[in-house]
Amino acid sequence: MTGIILVNAYAPVVMTRQVARLRDELVSRGVKISVKQNNTFPTAIRSGDIALKNFDCDFCLYLDKDKYVARMLEDRGIRLFNRADAIEKCDDKMTTLIELAGSVPVPDTLPGLLCYYDDAVVPKHVLDDVQSRLGYPVIIKESYGSLGKGVYKADNRLELEEVANRLKNIPHLFQKYIAQSHGKDMRVIVIGGEVVGGIIRSSDSDFRSNIGLGGKAQKTDVPHDIADMAVKASDILGLDYCGIDFLLSSTPLLCEVNSNAYFDGFEAATGINVAGLYAEHILHVMKNR
């Protein structure tokens, strides 16, 4: 069996260990693996059809969010982990919440208005609506972003107005702040529809708990209600692998789903071989395809 690990063209350093772990676990199971960066145009539309360039494999471990290349690879019959549709749904935070609404508890959320010219000003009544419906503090998120970047907290009207106007040309959303989960959440990893473990991420200096922003990770048992929500969300979104973040309150709320969640800190905190479990899932799927 042959596979390609396709990495983002501008992959951050934090991705290096993740790629190495996945490659080694697959190689140890007899898979011939090559690693490519998505910077050589592996797919193209040529002579009116989709064509591949130097991309001969049974499957692709897709560590990117480029929806165009993903869809073209699938069109040529290559099985992606995760699939293109699942990656798209997770990449856009608002789309994720829309897909899960009615099935999994999520925070109250308002989609941000998208403006198409720079000199516009967010209308007063829009800010009034956000203020009255979500209160303060209020969380504002760019719809696309990872590692806690593009997530802001406005403590008052002045800060809300500033952030809303700064993001008016960028897809974004407004979300209710969950005070009980300030600087803390639970990350749950799901592989092949099964919860493999969880960690509590916490920060003493930031309302965001991301490990990449200085947060700490501690192994935790995953309660049944959160495990059920995690599996349901993974199934609805069609994911082979994901990291799901839950806000911890009297009623846990699903915050975000990450289709390419980094697992370095998770493995260190839990001792769970996430890369090995993912490799086993990939082989199981491919052998029964």
Image (cartoon, rainbow, N blue to C red):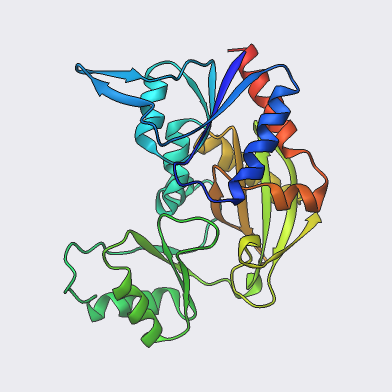
Q: State left or right for residue 202 relative to residue 60.
A: right
Does any portion of residue 221 appear in the rendered image? no
Image coordinates of residue 188 in percent, x first then y, are: 68, 49
Residue 230's quadrant in the figure? top right
Quadrant of the image for the C terminus? top right
Image coordinates of residue 124 in percent, x first then y, are: 24, 81
**Camera-side residue of 44 and 231:** 44
**Camera-side residue of 31 and 253:** 31
- The relative height of residue 202 versus residue 137 in the rendered view (above or below) is above
Q: Could you tell me which residue is drawn at 31 percent across and 61 percent down? A: 170
- The relative height of residue 177 versus residue 169 in the rendered view (above or below) is below
Quadrant of the image for the N terminus? top right
Image coordinates of residue 172 in percent, x first then y, are: 36, 62
Residue 233's quadrant in the figure? top right
- The relative height of residue 22 versus residue 140 in the rendered view (above or below) is above
Does any portion of residue 76 appear in the rendered image? yes
**Camera-side residue of 188 and 60:** 60
Number of disc labels: 0
- The relative height of residue 37 versus residue 113 in the rendered view (above or below) is above
Seen from this angle, which residue lies furthest right?
271
Q: Could you tell me which residue is drawn at 63 percent across and 73 percent down? A: 182
